[in-house]
Amino acid sequence: MPDKISGFSLGRRIAACCVLALLLGACATERKSLFDEEVTPEWKELPLQLPAFPAPGSLIPFQVSPDSSASFFIDERSLSQGADGIVRYTLLVRAAGGAENLSYEGIRCATAERRLYALGRGSEWVMSRNDAWQRIVDNAFNRQHAVLAKDFFCPPGSVLPDREAIVRQLRNAARLR
């Protein structure tokens, strides 16, 4: 004969406890938002303004890898940090043979993503056809984005640096090369 206490079988009591625990868990999860100190507004990217093409004197070199045959530069004049949390910059990549690729990009530290806004063609910007936000991956092909994010724009465990601090860090790193 099943164990009965107060008219309920052991199985029914266990089932009732499980349901009660689930309901309490749902209530606790629901109520958690009441205690959030700050409601995060929906993020919205600011309108894009393309910068002027870089002048040779405004290019700051940075090292991606000691093994890289390409040279990488950030245009100091184009470097900006928007109220939307995006660090925007012009990136120049110079291959060992002298070929150059110029791009205007953005890095969003809050999500560790990057976006390609435009490519330099001749002396004008051409909007990128692939301008979706993409996760920054630290691999040999896209290492420049990971280096910029980790070492200069979005250092882990610290407050995001302002534009002047980023320029200082880039210049200091260039001197140490």
Image (cartoon, grey):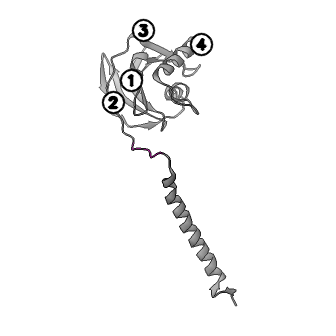
Q: Residues within 10 Å of mark 2 (few under 14, many from 20)?
A: some
Q: If you read the primary sequence from the N terminus, does the residue marked by circle 3 or circle 2 appear first?
A: 3
175 vs 83, nearest the viewer: 83
Looking at numbered disc 4 in the image, what kind of residue is underneath it?
A: Leu
Q: Position of residue 24 (x, y in %)?
A: 56, 66
Q: Position of residue 15 (x, y in %)?
A: 60, 76
In the rendered structure, are the residues bearing label 1 and label 2 in contact, judged by CB atoms less than 8 Å apart?
Answer: yes
Specify start and end residues of the magenta stretch as a single range.
38-42
Residue drawn at 59 percent across, 76 percent down: 16
Magenta stretch: includes residue 78 = no
Residue named by callout 3: 57
Q: Tell me if I can see residue 44 in this picture.
A: yes
Distance, label 2 to label 4, CA atoms, is 34 Å
Residue named by callout 2: 128
Residue named by callout 1: 103
In the rendered structure, are the residues bearing label 3 and label 4 in contact, judged by CB atoms less than 8 Å apart?
Answer: no
Q: Quadrant of the N terminus?
A: bottom right
> Which of the 4 quarters of the picture holds residue 79?
top left
Distance, label 1 to label 2, CA atoms, is 9 Å
Q: Tell me if I can see residue 62 in this picture.
A: no
Q: If you read the primary sequence from the N terminus, does the residue marked by circle 4 or circle 1 appear first?
A: 1
Q: Is residue 87 above or below residue 33?
A: above
Q: If you read the primary sequence from the N terminus, does the residue marked by circle 3 or circle 4 appear first?
A: 3
Residue drawn at 34 percent across, 26 percent down: 118
Residue named by callout 4: 176
Q: Indicate which label's residue lies in the foreground, 4 or 1.
A: 4
